[in-house]
Image (cartoon, rainbow, N blue to C red):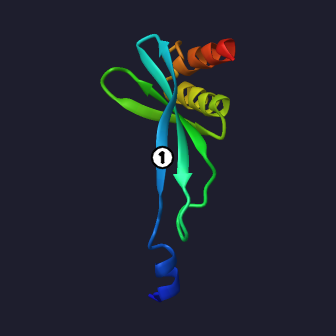
């Protein structure tokens, strides 16, 4: 195994991100949250763009279902993943949240 001190030094400060709740949507059986993730840029750390995550909180746990560069993109991604993982469930909380968001904008 080759160890490169320059690479190790480069990744020494991996960086952090600030996560803020951006929007909350009351839906059937829980709440959809959209969080704004803002990476804190440091030399040798993360150099990723800000993004949003969409979660569903059913009062017992909160799970990330979608990610995107906009609120709409994160909710659409979450909606698709929900559909794929909950095929027996006719209700999709992320479609409800997306409709609420579009109505509010």
The foreground one among 32 and 1 is 32
The answer to which of 40 and 14 lies nearer the viewer is 40
Q: Is residue 73 left or right of residue 24?
A: right
Q: Nearer the viewer, residue 64 or 104?
A: 104
**Where residue 65 sits: x, y (%)?**
50, 33
Neighbourhood count class around disc 1 (C-alpha, 10 Å): few under 14, some 14–19, many 20 upward: few
Secondary structure found at label 1: strand
Q: Please report the residue visible at 48 percent of the width from the left and 12 percent of the height from the top.
A: 27
How many marks the image carries: the answer is 1
**Which quadrant is the C terminus positioned in?**
top right
Asked whether residue 4 is in view, the answer is no
Q: Using residue 70 as the reference point, say whether residue 37 is left or right of it.
A: left
Taking the spot 52% from the left edge, 13% from the top edge, the residue there is 91
Residue drawn at point x = 57 percent, y = 38 percent: 52
Q: Quadrant of the N terminus?
A: bottom left
Residue 69 sits above or below residue 105 on the image: below
**Viewer-closest of 44 and 69:** 44
Q: Residue furthest left?
A: 60
Q: Quadrant of residue 96?
A: top right
Q: Residue at x 46, y 69 (%)?
A: 13
Asked if residue 30 is positioned above or below residue 44 in the image, the reply reads above
| Rendered location of residue 12, percent (x, y) | 44, 73
Vertical relation: 88 (above or below) 68: above
Picture quadrant of residue 63: top left
Q: Position of residue 99 (x, y in %)?
A: 64, 14
* Residue 62 position within the rendered picture, expressed as x and y whole percent measured from the top left: 38, 30
Please give the residue where the numbered disc 1 appears in the rendered image.
Answer: 18
Q: Is residue 38 visible?
A: yes
């Amino acid at each position: 195994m080759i160890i490169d001190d320059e690479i190790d030094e480069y990744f020494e400060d991996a960086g952090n991100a600030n996560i803020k709740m951006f929007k909350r949507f009351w839906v059937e059986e829980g709440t959809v949250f959209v969080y704004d993730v803002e990476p804190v840029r440091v030399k040798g750390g993360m150099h990723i763009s800000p993004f949003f995550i969409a979660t569903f909180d059913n009062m017992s746990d909160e799970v990330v279902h979608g990610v995107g560069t906009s609120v709409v993109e994160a909710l659409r991604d979450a909606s698709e993943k929900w559909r794929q993982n909950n095929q027996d469930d006719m209700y999709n909380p992320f479609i409800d949240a997306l409709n609420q968001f579009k109505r509010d904008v």
